[in-house]
Amino acid sequence: MLEDMEKCRNTAIIVAAGSGNRLGSDIPKQFLKLNGREILSYSVKSFQNHPDVDALVIVTSAEYFEHVSASYPDCHVVIGGSTRQESVTNGMQAITDGTELVLVHDAARPLVSHDIISECLEKLMHFDGVAPAIKPTDSMIMINGEDFDPLERSSLRIVQTPQCFHADTLNKAHNSGVVDTDEMGLVRRAVPSARLGFAEGSPANMKVTRALDLEILQLVLNAGT
Ligand code: CTP
Ligand code: MG
């Protein structure tokens, strides 16, 4: 795959440079194992198996660079930064000039499905950026000092990854100096004219953040086997 980077129209960037502070494990969560395979390998496989994804860039920390390069020889591996956005920026620098679509995915989200990737790519025919999203099921509030405001749940969404864009839109956002926690937020603020849409996400496309998430993922995997 690496030698074909020149012809890669659609590139997935998997960000795996975080340290997983909220989980508190010695090993960053993307390198913990589920059913004997490290979490990062699940999303790598899903993007590699998708016929419309031509190349993969994995962004990881200097400490794990050797490990990731050796474990995923078909991927382009680069070193990340101290924030997720810096890591994505470093990944963007590794994509080739001819790249049309960029799919930014969290390594900590192992169960992204073929259908989610497909729907995001299809919707990019009509939008500049698309991400999977799901409806919250709990009541939602906004804390306001000692008080709070109830929020109208039906108009809220939980945004997942892959967050997918035409490369020129994402490049423009990254060069703007705007800082945000994810690409949809960044592009919304940095490129207000961008048309952004959403695909149907899935509760199974969850992100490992806390210890219980690992147990839930294990149950989801067991149910699928
Ligand atoms: N990430 C990254 N570079 C960073 C920070 C995060 O590549 N400097 C990646 C993580 O590896 C993860 C994804 O971004 O795959 C989502 O971030 P998050 O869930 O916040 O992971 P961590 O930052 O590792 O966890 P925490 O915030 O609990 O420390
Ligand atoms: Mg984080």
Image (cartoon, helix red, strand yellow):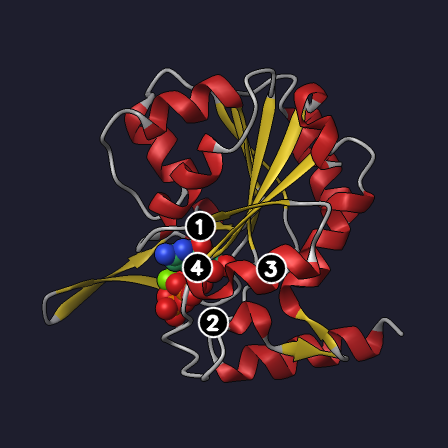
Is 4 or 38 nearer to us in this picture? 4
Residue at mark 2: C-beta within 8 A of ligand 1: yes
Q: Amino acid at mark 2?
A: Thr
Query: Could you tell which of marks 3 and 4 lies nearer the N-terminus?
Result: 4
Q: Which mark is residue 25?
A: none
Q: CA distance from mark 3 to mark 4?
A: 9 Å
| Residue named by callout 4 | 61
Q: Which residue is mark 3?
A: 68
Question: Which quarter of the image is occupied by the N terminus?
Answer: top right
How far from the left and from the top, in percent, is residue 138?
47, 68
Q: Secondary structure at mark 1?
A: strand
- Asked if the residue under mark 2 is in contact with the one under mark 3, i.e. CB atoms within 8 Å, the reply is no
For the point 44% across and 59% down, which residue is it? 61
Residue 120 left/right relative to 196: right
Label ID, residue 79: 1
Q: How many marks?
A: 4
C-alpha separation, residue under disc 2 versus residue under disc 1: 22 Å
Q: Position of residue 51 (x, y in %)?
A: 83, 34
Q: Which mark is residue 209?
A: 2
Q: Residues within 10 Å of mark 4 (few under 14, many from 20)?
A: many
Front residue of this view, candidates 214 and 89: 89
Look at the numbered discs 4 and 1 and tell me whether their residues touch, using CB distance below 8 Å: yes
Quarter in which the C terminus is drawn: bottom right
